[in-house]
Image: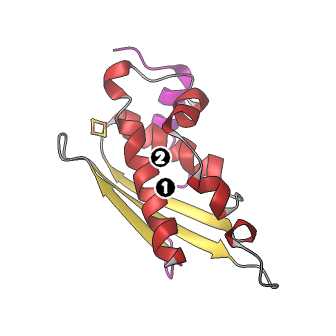
Amino acid sequence: MQYSKKVLKHFKDPHNQGVIKNADAVGEAGNLKCGDIMKIYLKIKSPLDKGGWGDYFIKDIKFETLGCAAAIAVSSALTDMVKGMALDEAMKLTKDKIVEELDGLPPIKIHCSMLGLEALHTAINEYKS
Ligand code: FES
């Protein structure tokens, strides 16, 4: 199995790893097949005026991942990608975009990219509700 240089870089030196105390939202996702688990912590900045969800953005994001190299690399890249992004925009992020950002993942590891997205979307949905 061949990982891209970007995947290895994110795996060896992950960005945004850790916990946000007093997070505004927390999302968790797990993969039943491999047993890997990921948790996303969000700090969200709300607008002063009453705009739509598009005006709320991710001020800070951290992750904890108990998983494979691909899951950790995805978590690192994903958190870099959505930091500063509006919530609506972050909800539209797809696994293909993350895989593209990492210069590809081995086909057997594509499902690992879903874990991060699920945790992120769960956190955002919880915040909205
Ligand atoms: Fe479980 Fe990658 S093998 S997320």
Would you say the residues marked 2 and 1 are in contact, meaning their CB atoms lie under 8 Å apart? yes
Depth check: give the residue in front, 104 or 67: 104
Stretch of the chain drawn in magenta: 1-24
Q: Is residue 19 visible?
A: no
Residue under numbered circle 2:
75
Q: Position of residue 46 (x, y in %)?
A: 71, 79
Q: Main secondary structure of the magenta part?
A: loop
Secondary structure type for disc 2: helix
**Label 1 neighbour load within 10 Å: few <14, some 14-19, many 20+:** some
Does dot 1 land on a helix, a strand or a loop?
loop
Kind of residue at badge 2: Ser
Q: Which residue is mark 1?
A: 17
Q: Residue furthest top?
A: 2
In the foreground, 49 or 45: 49
Q: Kindly indicate the quadrant of the structure image that contains residue 71.
A: top left
Q: In what quadrant of the picture does the N terminus appear?
A: top left
Is the residue 50 above or below the residue 28 in the image? Answer: below
Q: Residue furthest front?
A: 52
Q: Ligand 1 is in which quadrant of the figure?
A: top left
State whether residue 105 is above or below residue 10: above
> Residue drawn at (52%, 45%), measured in percent from left and top?
76
Label whose residue precedes the other's in the sequence (2 or 1)? 1
Identify the residue at horizontal 48%, vertical 28% (top origin).
8
Kindly identify which numbered label has been placed on residue 98.
none
In the image, is 98 to the left or to the right of 58?
left
Residue type at tag 1: Gln
